[in-house]
Image: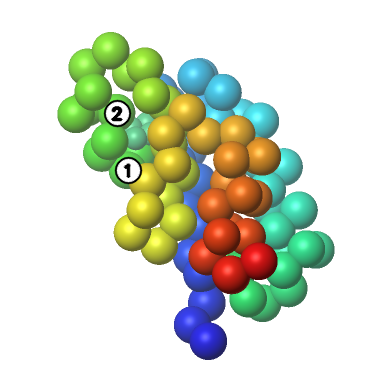
Amino acid sequence: MEKISVKVCLGTTCFVMGGSNLQELNDLIPKKYGDKVEVVGSPCLGLCSINWEYSKAPYVKIDEDVITEATVEKVLEAIEKKLGN
Ligand code: FES
């Protein structure tokens, strides 16, 4: 099975809008999923400029899917779905 890629936006908008809480995923994901899921921080994903109100930040990308207003719970849920759990 291919690895699932999780990109956590570390751009200023996302970081300020709550992305700083998502740093927890860097520990959590490897512990929970080992090498099935890869988590990386990313510079601005370019999504905040599409939505001028920034109201949907922070953003996380899971493969090609975008999670808006991302929380640790939302991201884990989306990973579980992808893994078919
Ligand atoms: S800062 Fe996160 S998408 Fe731009």
**Which residue is the extreme one toward the right?**
31
Name the residue rendered at 62%, 49% in the picture.
77
User: How far across and how far down the image is residue 34, in percent?
Assistant: 73, 73
Residue 77 lies left or right of residue 17; in this view the side is right
Quadrant location, ligand no. 1: top left
Name the residue rendered at 23%, 23% in the picture.
51
Q: Is mark 2 within 8 Å of ligand 1?
A: yes
Q: Say if 37 sits above or below 44 in the image.
A: below
> Disc 2 and disc 1: Cα gap in Å?
8 Å
Residue 11 in view, yes or no:
no
- The figure's colour scheme reads rainbow
Name the residue rendered at 70%, 58% in the picture.
29
Closest to the observer: 15 or 72? 72
User: How far across and how far down the image is residue 28, in percent?
Assistant: 76, 53
Other residues around mark 2 within 10 Å, as few (<14) / some (14–19) / many (≥20) = many
Asked if the residue at tag 1 contacts the one at tag 2, i.e. Cβ–Cβ closer than 8 Å, the answer is yes
Residue 46 lies left or right of residue 41; in this view the side is left
Q: Secondary structure at mark 2?
A: loop
Q: Say if 21 sits above or below 40 in the image.
A: above
Q: Say if 56 sits above or below 28 in the image.
A: above
State which quadrant residue 85 falls in. bottom right
**Which residue is the extreme one toward the front?**
85
Q: Secondary structure at mark 1?
A: loop
Q: Is mark 1 within 8 Å of ligand 1?
A: yes
Name the kind of residue labelled 1 in the image: Leu
State which quadrant residue 37 falls in. bottom right
Q: Which residue is mark 2?
A: 48
User: How far across and how far down the image is residue 7, in percent?
Assistant: 47, 53
Number of numbered discs: 2
Closest to the observer: 35 or 16? 35
| Residue 45, label in figure | 1
Name the kind of residue labelled 2 in the image: Cys
